[in-house]
Each structure stands twice: as C-alpha cells, then as structure tokens.
Amino acid sequence: MKTFILSAFFLIMMAGNAMGQLDSTLRWIFQNDTCHYQTKNKKFKLKFGGRIFADAAYYIEDKTELESGGEIRDLRLRLDLSYAKKWSASINVDFSEMESEMKDTYIRYDINSKSFLRGGYFYEPFGIEQTESTNSTRFMHVASTVEALRPGRNIGVEYKRWDDFYYVGAGVFGDLEFNEEEYSPYYYYWGFSNRDDDDNEISVSRYGISARAVVLPVLSSWSILHIGASGNYWVEDKEDRTLRFQSRAATHIENDRLIGLEVEHIKSQMMYGLELICTSGDLLVQTELIKKKVYRESNYDDYTAEGWYVQFGYILKGNSYKYNRQSARIFQPGKGTIELVARYNETDLNDSGVYNFKGMGGRQRDYSLGANWYISRNVLMRLNYTKVDLDRYAMNGEESIHMIQSRLQYSF
C-alpha cells in the first residue's frame, strides 16, 4: 500500500512537471454542477471531489441493545488527474470515524474508448453492489449478503472491456501483511513509523484472481436485460489462516455485527455469483446470488456460506432508468427524480455439516422499504425502513429488529 501511494503521488509530480514543460497554465472550468482545472491545450486535467453523508437512525430493539443516533457516515476527499487522454489517476481518502482510510486509489491507462487497464487499490470485479459506489446504491446500506461475503478492496491489476452487448472485467490481486504483530494503521496507509526500517518487512499474505462477465440481450432506451456471472479464487499464505464472515443488520450507526463467525485453518477460498438486472421504463428489478466455499487443512471440514437479495425500484417522478455500459450497472437517476425502492435479503452463515468447529454463524432475513429524492446532481435525501429477523445462531439468538434511517448526502 505504501509503495503504491508513493507511486501515485510521484505520478502527480510527473504530470505537473510535464505541464510545466508544455508551458501550460491551468484554467478553472465549471460544467454540469462540477468544476475542474485544465490546461489550455486540454492535455492535463485536475479535479477535486468529495462527499459527505449525514445519517440518522432510530431502532426498535428486541434482545440486542441498540443505540439510536446519528453519525457522519462518509467524509471523503478525492483527487482525479488525467493526461493526454490516455493516462489518469485517482486518490480517494475517507476521514469519517475520526481516522483516515484509503479508498479506491489507482493509476489507469485507457487502451481505447471501450477498454482500460489499471493498477492500484480498489474493489475486485465481482457482482453489482460489490463495485457500486455508495453514492448511487438504492439503499443506505449494501445488502447484508454482499457485506458478509464480498472480496472487498485489494491491491491488484485489472483489465476491463465493454461494448453495446457485453462487459468483461478480470484481475489479479494480493494482500500485504506486516510481519510485526502490531503496527500503526497510519503506517499502513501513509508510511509513517517510529520503528527502525529493518523491523518493517512486508510480505504478500494472500493472492487470487477475480472476474466478472455480463451479456445484454436487450438494451434500449426503454428496456434493459442484463445477465451476469462472477468468480473469485484466493489462496491464503499467511501465518494466521483465519477468515471472518460478518455483517451489520443493514445499518452502520449501530456498529455491532449481529451475524458472524471465524473460520480457522484455511487453505483457500472460492466464490461465485450470479446477477440479473431488468428494467422496463420506470420499473427496475435487480438480484444477486453469492455462494462461498472455504477449503481448510486436511484435518478440518470445509465451510460453505451463501446468500441472495432481490430489490425493486420505481421512478415516481423523473426519467426512466438508464444503463452504464462501462460499469455494467444502472446510472444514478437524474436531478429532480423521486424513486421508491424495496428489497428482500437473506444471508446464511450456517453450515450444518461443520458443527465440530462451530460453523453456525447465523441466518439473517431482512425486508426494506425506501424512498430517494435526487434534489440535484449533488444533493440526495434517503429514507429507509428495515425489519431484520435473526435465527437462534445469530450473535444474540433469535430476535426481530425494526429500524428507521435517513440520510442527507452531498457529493461534488
């Protein structure tokens, strides 16, 4: 991570130096409710962006004590650079929760108008919600199935290509680990340390591949049919061969994970996902199924977890849903749109065949209703209601929880 961040900043310095050699001057441009800087010859562009999410939640408890309240869910700053229409870079940092955390950070090369290669730290190509920005998800929180099972962000190299009727993305990824048992997170993200350099050895603790493919039998201004599949395989090569599967109950203000478990003595893991998007004018249906298999050392049973969700959208006011070919997802609706949404999610971390290592992480079923008001390109308001049902293997046993949540969201 440290090496890549230094490389990203080095790219910025190189771009600035190139701009100076071209004797160019940055000009301020305001367009489509955003602003950026660019040189007169338009070879070099620089854009600052960010977002802030202000959330509030009210919980109706059962067994688990939940604390209603509010938080700054997301507080990000982003720097985007582009040079000569082929090269670009992005650095994205989150400052919420009173600490800094690196988000998507990468260097990208556009092969042509419909394909690119990038390297850095970002979400692996797997499924819809795994790779979708929280700016444009339909609900305040991703489906619990995705949160519990997704591969997440890792350091790697990815290739993407798309056209009118297909999309493919594939990459190789790794995870860095410090050989010291304890280290500062600021060292991990920023490279600061008060220890000797000899003590700060970094190794690749795990590595794997990930891929996503989509076909579009129907793609018109009125109707969309998107069918996709994803695959992911990781080899664990670290001393502590432990994986954690856990999920919040469709909320973030209450930080407790209500389902979850640890799986030890792992060798590798394999995951696949199926996805579907279907629209007809103002109606949207989106669903994903994810299944993960964890292979363990010879004296231990393997572990399996799975889940799925289906969600619906209806545009009460505004234009119909539009498709983003480059990301293989639905565009965020335009300014002034009012959208009604509903979702059912089921996450199953119970594996009844592995009682000998307590492989019952709990099953969660949740039902959500919501409304989104896209006030402008930059401002969005959300309102969600969710009912969560947990089985007896959940962290605090069988119970039902109700929650009402709201968000005021600003991005630029």
Image (cartoon, rainbow, N blue to C red):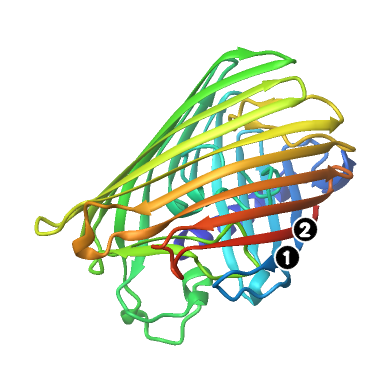
Dot placed on the residue nearer the N-terminal end, 1 or 2 = 1
- For the residues labelled 1 and 2, the Cα–Cα distance comes to 7 Å
- The three-letter code of the residue at mark 1 reads Ala
Picture quadrant of residue 48: bottom right
Report which residue position mark 2 lands on. Answer: 406
**Residue at (10, 55) in percent of width and height:** 298
- The three-letter code of the residue at mark 2 reads Ser
Judging depth in this view, the residue of 157 and 7 nearest the camera is 157
Report which residue position mark 1 lands on. Answer: 57
Residue 331: tell me if it is visible: yes
**Residue at (63, 69) in percent of width and height:** 61
Left or right: where 342 falls relative to 393: right
Q: Are marks 1 and 2 in contact (CB under 8 Å)?
A: yes
How packed is label 1: few (under 14 Cα within 10 Å), some, or many (20 or more)? many
Q: Could you say where residue 41 lies in the image, as x and y percent from the top left?
A: 79, 35
Picture quadrant of residue 204: bottom left
Tell me if residue 181 comes above or below residue 351 in the rendering. below
